[in-house]
Structures are given as C-alpha cells and as structure tokens.
Image (tube, grey):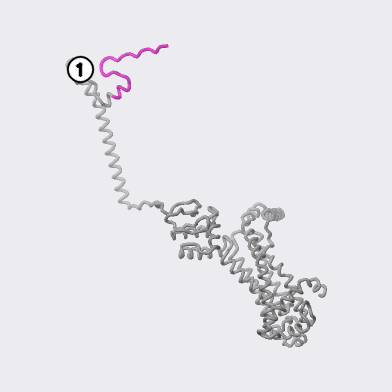
C-alpha cells in the first residue's frame, strides 16, 4: 500500500492541498470538525475536477458522434463478413483508423479522473489509519477523524469491524446503513446515466459493436461500483456519488440540447424547436441556428425526424435558410423541402379532380359520344360537298364550249379544287400539255 501511495504522491499532495483549502472556507461556516465542512470540501473537489474535465467531455461527445456517423459503414461490414468474424474485426479496426475514431472514447472521462480518485482514496485511508499524507498535518488529521456524515465517520468502511468503528467514535449499524445507501445510490446513478444514453441518445436502428459495448457498460459499471464500494471509505463514496450525479446532470443537458441524429432525443428536441420557432418566427439562439444549418445542408440525406421538422416549418409559413436562419415563407424560396428540392410557397398547388357519381359519368360519356357522332356527320357532309363539285362540272361538259359564258370559262379564284390542280401542274379543261423531255 505504501508503494502505491508513493507512486501517486505526485497527485496526492495537490489533492490534499485542495481539500485543505476548501475545508478552511467551510470550517468558518459550519465548524472545522463537522462532517459538513469535510464533506462539502470533497464535493467541491469533485466539482473542480469535473469543470477541468469539460474540454475532455466535449471531445468525448465529438468522438461519440463520429462513431454514430460510422454506423452505416459498420452495418455494411457486418453484412458483408457476417460469416467471418476475424475479417469483420479487421475491417472494423481499419475503418476506425481511417476515420480517426476510437470506440473506447466514452471511457475517457473515467480514465482521466482515475488518478484523482486514487489520490483521494489514499488521503482518506491515511485519515482512517491515523497517518499524515500530503499537506494534512496532525491537527487536520484529528479534525478529519472527528467528522461524521449522518453518523458515519469520514474514513469508515462497510467492511470495518465494530472495534475499528468504535475507535472512530461511531456505531457499526450507522456505518453500514449509511455506506449501503450510498453504494446503492452510486450504482443506481451510474446505471441510469448509461441507460439514458442507450435509450434516448443512440440510434438503435443500427446494431454495431459500439452499441454492444455501450450496452455492456450499462450493466458492468453498476456491478463494479457495488462490489468495490464496500471497500471504499465514506469520503470516497461521497466523491464517487457526487461525480456520478454530475455526470448524469451533464449528460441530461447534452441530450436535451444537442442530441444525436436519429435518436429519440432528437425527435423530442426537433418537436420543441418547431413549436419555439413557429411561435417566435425565427431561431433565437445560436445553437438552434447551428442545428438548423446542419439539417438544411443534409438535403436528401435527412432522417425521418429532420424531414418532419422541415415540413413543420413549411406548414407554419417559415423557411429554413442555408445559414441556419428562419424567415417568412411568402416571399422566400423554400430551401430543403422533404425531397431536398427547392420549391416556392407561392406556387399554386395541383388540385385533384372532383370525383363524379355514376350518373354523371354515364351522362358525360353519352354527351361525348354525341359530340363525336356530330363531328363525324359534319366531316362526312363536308367530304360530300367536296366530291359534288367535279360531278357538276362533268355534267355541264356535254354542252359546247362556245355556249359557255366567258365568265364561266375563267378558272375559279381561291377555289380549293383549282388550287389543288394548279399545284399538281395540270391545266383546267382542254388537252393536257405534254411534259418536255429533260435535256441531257
């Protein structure tokens, strides 16, 4: 144990110094020997560490989103090599390498705060054994040993015997009840945090190794906390319970305001965003404009929830622009309709013909047949009139040519028969002039 403590001495001293500084502040309010002063010092240490880990948490979110974008490719690899698990794993690792993602990125915050966890564990273990560690001197050690949280000493464990607990000024029943409740709360908060991620912020339509990993962590971590929690001092349980509650609240905020595309959280978020934008007539926050800009840029690649969001804006007379802004749709082009093709709100909608009754259809059919018959009769009469003209001229041709008036010997002007004969190169009446042979 001394070897491990010396190995973590580079972090043990800063952790003990931070606890002492917070204790000096809370000690003036609640008293230096109270459990509130030392307990709030540990809680404040957790908050400080988690604030420092926010950039790492943002990196974790980006890596998780990158894994989400790779899920279609992962599904193709699974279907292609479903009978060859080794080749499937090789292709998966190749895909991770090409995209620069890491399936273990979700464990980064836990790995980053592990040194602080071990340092705090050794500080509290030194308090339990009565040995100074870091910047905690004899007076601070005596004050910490007197501190109780709901009747349980700060350095007591669930597995401690009655003699050791009595030496710390507490009863075994109080220690085990308090530690059991804290272990249950710690495991339950860890399980709820992971389950919230799996049920609300993950696209469950695609089954990938990443999904299986997250599902495994949902059950493994709570069991690990329950098993190892019985060997943690009360102060460490306070630390771990606080960090779990922080993680749960931080994740709830991210899921609500920046959900994963294709998840149930995105459906709920876009529904709220549609109502908010329709009420105000614009996107008021920068984060809202960023999400709208990403949805418009997808075009035909939008998922079901994103298409529903665009259609909701269109029904409200609004248009999502490429820069993420939302404007009135009467004088603007609708960018990104459901099929990804730009249309205009002012364009007239195609109206469907009204459905007719059986009697109307029959009367309409009879009327159309009557009109068709009438038009056919008109065409027949016109053809008969055209054919009657040459017959009349043939009957009159038996009379001598000299007896005809001069006016009748003139070819009819503008007549259809005369024009057709003129176009054919034939003379009207009399013998036809033979065609001259072509000159060679």
Q: Is residue 217 visible?
A: yes
**Residue 83 seen in the current view:** no
Q: Quarter of the image holding residue 404?
A: top left
Extreme-right residue of the structure: 3
Where residue 250 appears, as percent x and y from the top left, is 61, 69
The residue lying toward the viewer, choosing from 177 and 32, is 32
The magenta-colored residue range is 419-440
User: In which quadrant of the rendered image does the N terminus lie?
Assistant: bottom right
Task: Name the residue: 38% across, 12% down.
Answer: 437
Residue at the spot of label 1: 398
Q: Could you say where residue 50 lies in the image, as x and y percent from the top left?
A: 67, 70
Question: Measured along the vertical axis of the image, is residue 137 above or below residue 72?
Answer: below
Residue 137 picture location, percent across and down: 78, 81
Q: Is residue 232 above or below residue 389?
A: below
Number of numbered discs overlaid on the protein picture: 1
Residue nearest the observer in this picture, 297 or 164: 297
Please tell me whether residue 172 belongs to the stretch shown in magenta. no
User: Of helix, strand and loop, which mostly describes the magenta segment?
Assistant: loop
- Element marked by disc 1: helix
Toward which corner of the image does residue 256 lie, by quadrant? bottom right
Number of residues whose C-alpha sits closer than 10 Å to that of mark 1, classed few (under 14), some (14–19) or many (20 or more):
few
Q: Could you tell me which quadrant the C terminus lies in?
A: top left
Percent x, y of residue 329? 44, 57
Taking the image as shown, residue 427 lies to the left or right of residue 173, namely left
């Amino acid at each position: 144990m001394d070897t491990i403590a010396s190995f973590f001495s580079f972090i043990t001293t800063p952790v003990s110094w931070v606890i002492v500084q917070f204790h000096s502040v809370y000690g003036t309010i609640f008293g230096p020997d109270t459990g509130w002063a030392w307990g709030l010092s540990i809680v404040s240490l957790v908050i400080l560490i988690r604030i420092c880990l926010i950039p790492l948490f943002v990196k974790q979110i980006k890596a998780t989103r990158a894994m989400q974008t790779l899920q279609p490719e992962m599904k193709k690899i699974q279907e292609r090599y479903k009978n060859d698990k080794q080749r499937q794993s090789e292709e998966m690792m190749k895909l991770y390498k090409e995209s620069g993602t890491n399936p273990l990125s979700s464990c980064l915050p836990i790995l980053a705060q592990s040194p602080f966890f071990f340092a705090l564990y050794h500080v509290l273990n030194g308090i339990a054994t009565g040995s100074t560690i870091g910047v905690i001197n004899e007076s601070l050690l005596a004050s910490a040993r007197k501190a109780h949280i709901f009747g349980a000493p700060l350095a007591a464990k669930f597995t401690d015997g009655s003699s050791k607990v009595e030496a710390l000024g507490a009863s075994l029943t109080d220690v085990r009840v308090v530690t059991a409740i804290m272990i249950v709360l710690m495991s339950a908060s860890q399980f709820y945090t992971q389950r919230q991620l799996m049920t609300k912020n993950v696209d469950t339509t695609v089954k990938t190794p990443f999904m299986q990993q997250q599902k495994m962590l949902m059950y493994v971590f709570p069991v690990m906390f329950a098993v190892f929690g019985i060997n943690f001092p009360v102060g460490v349980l306070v630390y771990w319970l606080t960090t779990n509650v922080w993680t749960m609240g931080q994740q709830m905020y991210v899921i609500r305001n920046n959900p994963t595309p294709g998840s149930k959280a995105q459906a709920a978020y876009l529904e709220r965003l549609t109502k908010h934008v329709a009420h105000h007539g614009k996107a008021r926050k920068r984060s809202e404009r960023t999400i709208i800009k990403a949805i418009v840029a997808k075009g035909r690649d939008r998922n079901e929830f994103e298409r529903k969001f665009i259609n909701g804006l269109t029904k409200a007379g609004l248009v999502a622009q490429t820069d993420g802004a939302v404007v009135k749709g009467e004088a603007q082009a609708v960018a990104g309709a459901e099929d990804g093709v730009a249309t205009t709100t002012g364009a007239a909608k195609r109206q469907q013909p009204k459905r007719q009754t059986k009697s109307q259809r029959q009367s309409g059919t009879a009327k159309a047949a009557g009109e068709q018959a009438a038009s056919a009769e008109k065409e027949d009469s016109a053809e008969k009139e055209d054919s009657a003209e040459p017959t009349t001229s043939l009957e009159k041709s038996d009379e001598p040519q000299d007896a005809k008036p001069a006016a009748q010997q003139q070819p009819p002007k503008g007549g259809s028969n005369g024009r057709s004969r003129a176009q054919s190169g034939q003379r009207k009446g009399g013998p036809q002039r033979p065609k001259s042979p072509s000159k060679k």
